[in-house]
Image: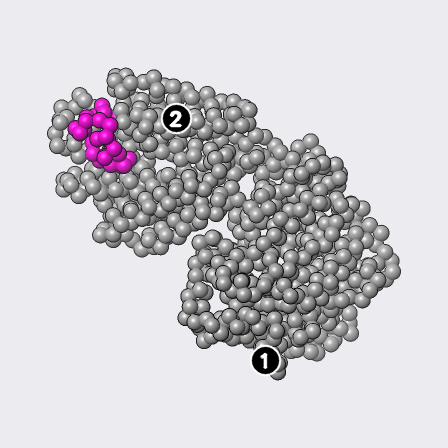
Amino acid sequence: MAVQGSSRLVAFDEMKPAEAGLRKPYSAYDRWLQDQDPARLTEKMQDAERVFRKTGITFAVYGEVEAAERLIPFDIVPRIISGSEWRRLTQGIEQRVQALNAFLDDIYHRQEILKAGRVPKELIAGNEAFLPEMIGVKPPAGVYTHIIGVDIVRTGEDEFYVLEDNARTPSGVSYMLENRETMMQLFPELFQQVKVRPVENYPQLLRQSLAATRPEGVKGTPTIAVLTPGSYNSAYFEHAFLADQMGVELVEGTDLRVVDGHVAMRTTEGYKRIDVLYRRVDDAFLDPLTFRADSALGVAGIMDVYRAGNITIANAPGTGIADDKAIYSYMPEIIEFYTGRKAMLENIRTWRCSEPDSLAYVLEHLGDLVVKEVHGSGGYGMLVGPAASKKEREAFAAKLKAKPSNYIAQPTLSLSTCPILTEKGLAPRHVDLRPFVLVSDRIQIVPGGLTRVALKEGSLVVNSSQGGGTKDTWVLDD
Amino acid sequence: MLLGRTANGLYWMNRYIERAENMARLVDAGLRMALTRSQNAAEEWTSVVVSAGVDVAFANRHDEYSAATVSDFLIRDTANPSSAMSSMETARMNARMVRTALTRETWESINEAWMSLKRTLAKPIDARDLPAVLDTIKRETALIRGAFYGTMLRNEIFDFAQIGTYVERADNTARILDVKYYVLLPSISWVGSSLDNYQWESILRSVAAHRSYRWVYDAEYKPTNIADYLILNPRMPRSLTFCYRFIVEHLGFRAAEYGQRLPCHDLAEDMLAKLRAGSIKDIFDTGLHEFLDAFIASNHRFGEQIAKDYRFY
C-alpha cells in the first residue's frame, strides 16, 4: 500500500531524472520508442484493454454493484530495473524474508526476541493477528510464509525502502504474469531488442516450492489445491489463474471436509486427500471450529489436521503478526536479531503513536505525515496529511488521541516516477514495486514483480481499489 | 480427478449454452411462421412460449403474444431465467467457476459471447434487427462449440459438459414436439392442408432440420416421418435417440475410467434401449403425448441421478 502523501518535491524519475537525462536501463527501450508512431501506440493501448476484457482479467470492487467487474488499467510503458539494481534488491529481500520466518518461529515458540526486550511483549499478546492456536505448532518443513509480497518504494538513484511486508496472502502475481504476456503479444519485436529476464516460470516455481513444504509423511508427488473464497471474491481471477497455471485444483470450502484425519476434496470419484493447501482465505475464516464460527469459506477441523502435521497450509495461520504495521516499525531490530546483520533494505521512518513522544510529534506534524491504521490495508482508513483539509486533519487527530496504539505515522515520501502513455504523450506518474518471494527449503524471487502506478497526475495512491494501474516490470539481463 | 462441484459447473455451463441457442431457434421458427402467415400469429407465438417452458412466467409479465413481447421475453429479459441473455449469463458464471477446467479458447469464447450478447441486447430489440440478433446468438454459441470441440481434451471434463448439452437438447426437442403433437397426429381431419405444411416446417425449423429432413425422407412432409426424425433417427443431432446415444457413450467412458457403474448408467441405457427398440408406429399407438411426457420426466430423473451419483453437490 504505497500511499505517502502528495508530491511536493520533484520526484526521482526512473527513466529521465531531471538532472541526468536518460537513465541507462531505459536506453534500449528509448531507442525503440523513438521509432514508434504515437498513434500506433495509442492503438496498442486499446488492444491491451480488449485483451484483458476478453480474457476476463477483472477484479471486483466491494460495494460497487455497477462496476461488478472492473479492469485494472494497464499502461504499456514498462518499468525497467537493471540487473545490478535487482541483485541489490533481492539480497535485501532475502535477508528480510529469512528474518520474518525466524521471527514467526520464535514468536510461536520460545519468544526469545520478547525475552531480550527487542520487541515489546504487549505488542504481541494484544495483537489480533497473533494466533494463540499456533503456539508450539511446527509447520511442515518449518516454513511460515511460503509466499511474501514485499512492497518497495524508491526515492532516488540508490534509495529503496520497504513500505510493507505482505506475509498473509499477497495478491497481484497474476498481473505480473498477464502484463508480461500482454506486452509480448503487443510488442514482440521489442523483446528481441531488449533482453528482459523471464517471469513466466513463476507458477512452476510456486508449485515446486509448495510441494517442497509438504507434510513429512507424504511420499511422492503431493496433492496441492488452491482454496478460494469463491467466484465473487475480488481476487478470484488470480486464484483461478494460479490453480490453472500450476495444474492443481481450485477448491472452495464447500468442496472440503476432514476425512480420516486428512483434509479431502469431494470429487466425482469420492473424497481425495489434499496434502498442501494454498489458501487465499483469511485466518479468521479458515476453520469455523477454531476461528469464526460463521465462516462458510473454510474447513471445519482443518486446524486439528494441521496440528497433527497432516496438511501444509500456505501461508501458515498466524503469519499476520509479521506484517502488522506496529511490528513493521521494529523490522530493523528484528532483522538484526535473527540475521546478526544490519538490514540491507531500509524501513521508512515510523512513529509509533502508542509512544507518548511520538504521538505528540505526530499530532504536531499531522500536515506533513501519513497516518495509517495498524491493521488496515488497501489504502483504507488512513490520513494523507498534506492532501487532507484542515477539518479532516482535526477529525483524524481526535481518532488518534482516542486510540493512539491503533496508529503509526510515516513521513510523506516523494515516490519515484515512471512515464505512462497519456493522450498527450508520455507523462511521469508515481510507482511502487511488489516483488514476489517464494520460501521453501530455499528462497526464490522471480525477476520482476508487480509495478503499481498512480494514474492521476501528482497522485501517490497506487492501490487498484482507488484508481491505480499496473505496468509490466522488466528486470534486464545485464 | 474432477471436483464434484466442477462437474456440476461444466454440466450446467453446457446446458445453459444449449438453452441460449435453443431460445434463438424457437424465436426464429416463430418469426418464420408469423411472417408467412398473417392470421393466428398470436397462436403461433403462444406455442413458442409454451415450447420454451416459460408460459406461466410469460403470462405474469405480458398480456399479449406478439413478436415483440415473445422475442423480448425469450431473448432479452433477464427476469426470465431461461432467456438467451440469462442463459448466457448463467453459462458464463458457471464457466468462470470452472475456468481452470477449460482451455483458454473455450473460456474466451464464452466470455466473448456474453460480452457480445450484453452489447447486442443492451437496448430493446428493434423488429428489423431481430433476425440479426438471432443470428448473433447462433453464431456465438457455434463459436463456443467450435472452441470446445477443437481444443478440449477428451476426458471427464469433456464428458460431463457434453452430457449437459445432450440432456438439455433432448428436453428441448421433446418439448417442441409435445407442444405440437396434435399437429402430427394422423387422425385430425385437416391433415394435408397447407396449414399443416407450415406447422410441420415450423417444427423442423425450430430444431434446424428443415433441410436435412429432405436428405433422409421424401421431399413431402409426413407427420410420422417428422416424428421419426426427431425422436428415433440416430443420426439426427437433435433427436432423442441421438442425445441418449451420446449420453450413454460419455457415461461409458466414465464407467471405464473410474471402474464403477452407477444407477444413472442403468437409467440412461434403459432409456436408449427403449428408443432403439421403439418404432414410430408403436409410439403413435400408445400416444405421442404420453410418450413425450414420460420421456421428459425420465430425462429429468436422469439429470437428478447423475448429480447424485457423481457428487455434483
Three-letter amino acid code of the residue under disc 1: Gly
Q: Is residue B206 magenta?
A: yes
Residue designated by label 2: B245
Q: Position of residue A233 (x, y in %)?
A: 55, 51
Residues shaded magenta: B200-227
Q: Nearer the viewer, mark 2 or mark 1?
A: 1
Q: Nearer the viewer, residue B232 or A401?
A: B232
Residue at x 63%, y 63% (from the top left corner)? A477
Q: Position of residue A412 (x, y in %)?
A: 65, 75
Q: Is residue A391 visible?
A: no
Q: Position of residue B196 (x, y in %)?
A: 16, 30
Residue at x 35%, y 43% (from the top left corner)? B142
Residue at x 70%, y 40% (from the top left corner)? A311
Query: Residue A151: which quarter of the image?
Result: bottom right
Residue designated by label 1: A21
Marks counted in the figure total 2
Instruction: Tell me the subunit letter for badge 2.
Output: B
Quadrant that contains the N terminus of chain B? top right
Three-letter amino acid code of the residue under disc 2: Arg
Query: Residue A51: which quarter of the image?
Result: bottom left
Instruction: Tell me the subunit letter for badge 1.
Output: A
Query: Height in image: B111 above or below A360?
Result: above
